[in-house]
Amino acid sequence: MVETEVKIRVNDLNSLKDKILNLNVKLEKDRHYEENTLFDLPTQDLYKKRQALRVRTVGKKTFLTFKGPPKKSRKFKIRTEYETEVKNEKQLRKILKSLGFIPVFTYQKFRTVYRQKHLKICLDETSIGNFMELEGERNQIVRFTNALGIPKKEFIKLDYIQLLKKETGEISEAP
């Protein structure tokens, strides 16, 4: 599956919630805690190819996600993504370790998920601030942000790891 997404920094999450609820969105998943761990080989093969292997834990559910390298786009992050639910997180981590993968980065967030037809709207609370993440087709994302009065110049293509590293000064721009 190809994923198209953008993030937008949000100063007032409650105000944004009120605005999006007026745009015919449906609550898909109440506010919940997520822990995300990225894995790579010690030689950073995935990082060098701009790929990602993530284990996400949401409550008692665990998901394994592979993300391919981003395609060229000025305003949107577009990449291939494959995700599956895994029944046993401990066994998954043992398999990854046996294959030579090591955890390289872990981050947490609280997320609330809404949906407007095929557009997924996530309100994320992270250690570096609040964000709205939109996943869907480009025209859906643009229509939705236009309805909120958010210009394209506010679109962020960086993922949370890049944002965290940028915030701490570890990187100056996205690779």
Image: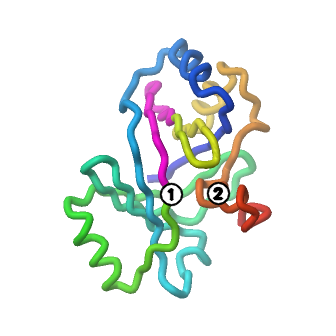
Mark 1 = which residue? 107
Residues marked 1 and 2 touching at CB (< 8 Å): yes
Judging depth in this view, the residue of 127 and 54 nearest the camera is 127
| Structural crowding at the residue carrying mark 2, measured as other residues with C-alpha within 10 Å and reported as few (<14), some (14–19) or many (≥20) | some
Name the residue at 60% across, 70% down: 50
Name the residue at 44% across, 26% down: 117
| 45, above or below 20, in the image | below
When asked about the image quadrant of residue 14, the answer is: top right
Please state the horizontal and vertical placement of residue 141, each as a whole percent of the image.
60, 33
The overriding secondary structure of the stretch rendered in magenta is strand
Q: Is residue 90 left or right of residue 19?
A: left
Say what secondary structure mark 1 lies in: strand
C-alpha distance separating marks 1 and 2:
9 Å
Please state the horizontal and vertical placement of residue 78, each as a whole percent of the image.
59, 52
| Structural crowding at the residue carrying mark 1, measured as other residues with C-alpha within 10 Å and reported as few (<14), some (14–19) or many (≥20) | some
**Amino acid under label 2?**
Leu
**Amino acid under label 1?**
Tyr
- Whether residue 117 appears in magenta in the rendering, the answer is yes
Q: Is residue 26 left or right of residue 92?
A: right
Identify the mark nearer the N-term, 1 or 2: 1
Mark 2 = which residue? 164
When asked about the image quadrant of residue 48, the answer is: bottom right
Please state the horizontal and vertical placement of residue 17, each as a whole percent of the image.
54, 22
Name the residue at 60% across, 23% down: 16
| 87, above or below 131, in the image | below
Name the residue at 44% across, 29% down: 114
Q: Quadrant of the C terminus?
A: bottom right
Q: Which residues are magenta?
A: 108-122
| 64, above or below 92, in the image | above
| 19, above or below 7, in the image | above
Q: Is residue 28 left or right of residue 78?
A: left
